[in-house]
């Protein structure tokens, strides 16, 4: 209906009541993108945990032996030594670096401790850990002072340290002296039915989580991975942080070698071959970004357990050859990296 007004001869049009215009519902239009963003954020932060739960449920349903205490404890014991290596790798990756030498350092730590075992458990432990610390410090100094990329430094150290291990032993195992009972206990002992390596790994992860979360050093590690140049401009001693981080990685890798030598009764120069890749896989699967600055110890622990359970399921299946297991591991890791990359890109774009 039209009403003629007298103001300047303008014509005012009033829509009929039946044609009331309804305002758009903004909430419903935004609900789906917001839900997707939350789901993507959840997958990026807790995707490994969701996958671990799903894999465990599958194992319980398909394999009768999976949920037995013996099998579960075996999974924990077998992956405890990888846990040490992955813990050190986590700290290095959080700074934006990488440590490819950890497998060789594991071998060096094991054979050094075994060679010193006739002098007692303390001498064996101190010598093995010191060897790992020295190699880690050398890595850190070359990265910070010589300004060489961590990939190149640790790749060269991986080759050199493995050569030292093979040459010093003549490619033979070094037996742990039987009198070093404490040494052997580290690899074979139990406390209240729980294997000592599992308890040591749990303690190491607890300490690592506490350090990264509550100490100044932990904040500096994240700052180095987030933006090293900006951290230096703020007055942070980033070079010292990096050297310390590589030293910690070396010590933890050597500790893994010592525990492995205690379990096997000998330090082996070929021990730890390929473990650097398994450690990186566990860190990445857990959700720590290779670019640094994001992730943590808890995520790596979930990644170690996830990979350990998957490999255990392969063994329980019994029909998957080691070669195909390697293929499946590679495909799985690649899939995880692709998913994380897409989630990170969406998060960065605000989608």
Image (cartoon, grey):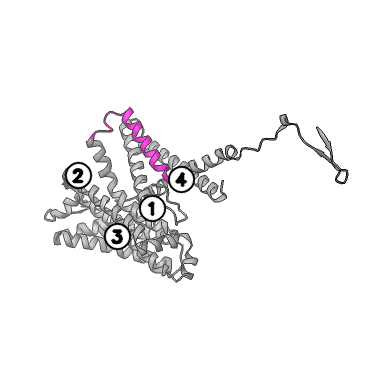
Residue assigned mark 4: 44
| Real-space Cα separation, disc 1 to disc 2, in angstroms | 26 Å
**Residue 59 placed where, x, y %?**
33, 32
SS at circle 3: helix
Residue assigned mark 3: 251
Quadrant of the drawing holding the C terminus: top right
Sequence-first tag of 3 and 4: 4
Is 202 part of what is drawn in magenta? no
Does residue 223 lie above or below 325 as drawn? below
Residue drawn 39% across and 58% down?
92
Q: Nearer the viewer, mark 3 or mark 4?
A: 4
Q: Nearer the viewer, mark 4 or mark 2?
A: 4
Is 183 or 49 nearer to us in this picture?
A: 49
Residue assigned mark 2: 194
Does residue 137 lie above or below 208 as drawn? below
Does residue 212 lie above or below 310 as drawn? below
Residue assigned mark 1: 296
Q: Does the image show residue 170?
A: no
Q: Nearer the viewer, mark 1 or mark 2?
A: 1
Dot 4: few (<14), some (14–19), or many (≥20) neighbours within 10 Å? many
Sequence-first tag of 1 and 2: 2
SS at circle 2: strand
Residue 140 found in image quarter: bottom left
């Amino acid at each position: 209906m039209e009403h003629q007004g007298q103001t300047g001869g303008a014509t005012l049009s009033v829509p009929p009541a039946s044609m009331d215009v309804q305002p758009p519902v903004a909430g419903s239009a935004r609900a789906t993108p917001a839900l997707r963003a939350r789901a993507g954020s959840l997958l990026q932060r807790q995707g490994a945990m969701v996958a671990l739960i799903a894999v465990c449920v599958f194992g319980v349903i398909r394999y009768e032996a999976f949920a037995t205490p013996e099998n579960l404890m075996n999974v924990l014991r077998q992956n405890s030594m990888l846990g040490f290596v992955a813990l050190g790798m986590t700290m290095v990756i959080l700074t934006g670096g990488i440590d490819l030498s950890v497998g060789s350092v594991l071998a060096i730590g094991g054979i050094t401790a075994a060679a010193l075992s006739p002098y007692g458990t303390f001498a064996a432990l101190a010598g093995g850990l010191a060897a790992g610390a020295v190699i880690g410090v050398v890595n850190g100094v070359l990265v910070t002072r010589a300004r060489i990329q961590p990939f190149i430094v640790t790749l060269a150290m991986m080759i050199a340290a493995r050569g030292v291990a093979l040459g010093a032993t003549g490619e033979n195992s070094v037996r742990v002296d039987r009198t070093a009972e404490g040494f052997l206990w580290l690899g074979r002992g139990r406390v209240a039915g729980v294997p000592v390596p599992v308890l040591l790994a749990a303690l190491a992860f607890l300490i690592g989580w506490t350090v990264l979360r509550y100490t100044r050093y932990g904040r500096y590690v994240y700052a180095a991975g987030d933006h090293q140049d900006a951290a230096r401009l703020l007055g942070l001693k980033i070079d010292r942080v990096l050297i310390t981080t590589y030293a910690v990685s070396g010590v933890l890798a050597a500790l893994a070698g010592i525990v492995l030598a205690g379990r096997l009764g000998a330090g082996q120069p070929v021990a730890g071959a390929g473990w650097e890749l398994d450690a990186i896989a566990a860190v990445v699967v857990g959700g720590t970004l290779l670019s640094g600055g994001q992730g943590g110890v808890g995520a790596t622990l979930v990644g170690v357990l996830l990979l350990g359970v998957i490999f255990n399921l392969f063994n329980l299946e019994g029909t998957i050859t080691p070669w195909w297991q390697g293929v499946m591991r590679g495909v799985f890791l690649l899939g995880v990296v692709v998913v994380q990359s897409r989630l990170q890109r969406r998060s960065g774009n605000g989608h």
